[in-house]
């Protein structure tokens, strides 16, 4: 009964296909990539103290190991994000995984400190591109409950963090740091092994005019999910928009060269990010990624420092027998890593109910309140409890901002925008070790905590200046359509 010229958009197709077996398989695959990055990042909390002792490194040299990783991620996040928007999500994240796996595994055989820093920096370049996994998976998820499913995806990061803490607890005392580094690369090898089974993002293909390829992927999804695609032909959003405005196909054709002409003007993704419609969002996201990354890794590294036998500043948290200090490092890091589990549950519960912006404001606020008492030395129990709570909420904000960022950008600049924002965040990660290691080791815990608390406060305050909420909004493909594009029933 429908016109033989019936067409449907990608969002309409995803709504018809629904979330099922197809997306679940992609969730596991993309989640494994997220686990790989989490494990590679968390191992920095454990190898630094051991390598420092083994090679007689200064605190600055120890900090440089983490800084080198974040420096590599800074370059990698921008590069892989740009390649993702230009050549495809799959190509980008497979290239990134290949680099991180090779260099990460090689760093286990580092003959000296210089080689370790070099290999970890190269591994960081690959790790910087693994954020593309999130953009890729997001583009397969139907609009309803998208926030909840992205929180489920984020849970794989928490699995990676807890797995690395447990692995370090088992491996480090018995086998040493080199085995920890080598074993931490296993998830990346698995990602590469199954890569031939993974499809490209149909949203990327559709936006590039490759709608037939996108439709084939959607047909596979409908078969696995035991659903049906809408009648008609898949078209891009801009073509559907033209069909809604014009009555004849000939008029629709005129809309295609418009985008082509715009592309020929040489507008790069960077220029689009600084257009009047995206400038405000871009700058606030930079502040948010910088602050969130700085605070998240700051809490992790401060946990390691306060639990280490290197803390000789007379606080009650370090007044335990020396032979118990090494175990306390693994125990405290493991316990605070578990904080991310309730953090996931909280963010999953509220993100689709109260929205992304309000969720972030509330959780930044709670993290600030719990972290601030550490400006003075507390007992070991109180310190661990406060760090547990602060990490619970700061990890929750990280989950939500990683949902909001790809949602707020259109497809043609999504990976580039998120990649650059992530790169700015890596600058925070580069500076963070100097604070966590340098200030705390130098008996300046109060200064370190005040600085981190200030960053948390500013990050939460900046969220209120985002121009719009993305809850229940469909993803857009081109700059300029977001304000008028809502999902059905929004």
Image (cartoon, helix red, strand yellow):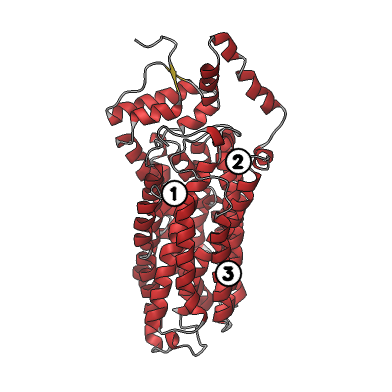
Classify 10 Å Cα crowding around label 1: few (below 14), some (14-19), many (20 and above).
some
Classify 10 Å Cα crowding around label 2: few (below 14), some (14-19), many (20 and above).
many
Residue 409 x, y percent position in the rendering: 56, 40
**Can residue 40 be seen?**
no
Instruction: Of the two numbered discs 1 and 3 on the same chain, state the one appearing first in sequence.
Output: 1
Q: Which residue is mark 2?
A: 82
Q: Which residue is mark 3?
A: 454
- The local secondary structure at tag 3 comes to helix
Of tags 1 and 3, the one toward the viewer is 1
Residue farthest along the left direction in this orientation:
226
**Can residue 360 be seen?**
yes
Classify 10 Å Cα crowding around label 3: few (below 14), some (14-19), many (20 and above).
some
Instruction: Of the two numbered discs 2 and 1 on the same chain, state the one appearing first in sequence.
Output: 2
> Is 169 positioned to the left or the right of 462 in the image?
left
Q: Which residue is mark 1?
A: 355
Residue 230 x, y percent position in the rendering: 36, 21
């Amino acid at each position: 009964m429908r016109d033989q010229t019936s067409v449907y958009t990608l969002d309409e197709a995803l709504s018809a296909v629904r979330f099922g077996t197809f997306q679940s398989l992609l969730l596991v695959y993309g989640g494994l990539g997220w686990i790989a990055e989490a494990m590679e990042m968390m191992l920095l909390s454990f190898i630094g103290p051991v390598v420092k002792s083994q090679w007689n490194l200064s605190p600055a040299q120890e900090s440089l190991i983490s800084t080198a990783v974040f420096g590599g991620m800074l370059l990698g996040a921008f590069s892989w994000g740009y390649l993702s928007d230009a050549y495809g999500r799959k190509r980008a994240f497979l290239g990134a995984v290949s680099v991180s796996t090779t260099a990460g595994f090689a760093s286990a055989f580092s003959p000296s400190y210089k080689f370790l820093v070099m290999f970890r920096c190269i591994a960081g370049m690959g790790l910087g591109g693994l954020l593309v996994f999130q953009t890729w998976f997001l583009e397969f998820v139907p609009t309803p409950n998208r926030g909840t499913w992205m929180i489920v995806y984020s849970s794989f990061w928490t699995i990676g963090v807890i797995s690395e803490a447990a692995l370090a607890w088992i491996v480090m005392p018995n086998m040493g740091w080199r085995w920890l580094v080598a074993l931490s690369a296993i998830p990346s090898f698995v990602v590469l092994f199954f890569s031939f089974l993974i499809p490209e993002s149909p949203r990327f293909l559709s936006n590039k005019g490759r709608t037939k390829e996108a439709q084939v992927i959607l047909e596979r999804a409908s078969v696995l999910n035991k659903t049906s695609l809408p009648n008609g032909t898949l078209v891009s959003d801009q073509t559907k928009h033209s069909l809604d405005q014009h009555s004849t196909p000939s008029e629709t054709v005129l809309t295609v060269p418009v985008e082509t002409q715009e592309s020929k003007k040489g507008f790069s993704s960077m220029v689009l990010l600084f257009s009047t419609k995206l400038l405000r969002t871009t700058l606030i996201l930079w502040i948010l990624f910088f602050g969130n990354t700085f605070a998240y890794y700051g809490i992790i590294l401060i946990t390691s420092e306060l639990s280490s036998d290197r803390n000789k500043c007379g606080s009650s948290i370090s007044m335990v027998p020396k032979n118990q200090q090494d175990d306390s490092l693994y125990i405290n890091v493991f316990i605070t890593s578990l904080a991310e589990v309730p953090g996931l549950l909280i963010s999953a519960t509220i993100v689709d109910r109260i929205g992304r912006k309000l969720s972030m404001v509330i959780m930044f606020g709670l993290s600030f309140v719990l972290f601030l008492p550490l400006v003075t030395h507390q007992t070991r129990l109180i310190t661990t409890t406060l760090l547990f709570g602060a990490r619970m909420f700061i990890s929750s904000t990280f989950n939500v901002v990683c949902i909001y960022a790809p949602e707020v950008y259109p497809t043609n600049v999504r990976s580039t925008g998120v990649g650059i924002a992530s790169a700015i965040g890596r600058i925070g990660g580069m500076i963070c070790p100097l604070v966590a290691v340098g200030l705390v080791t130098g008996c300046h815990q109060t200064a370190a905590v005040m600085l981190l608390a200030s960053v948390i406060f500013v990050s939460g305050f900046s969220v209120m200046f985002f121009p719009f909420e993305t809850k229940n909004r469909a993803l857009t493909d081109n700059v300029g359509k977001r304000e008028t594009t809502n999902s059905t029933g929004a």
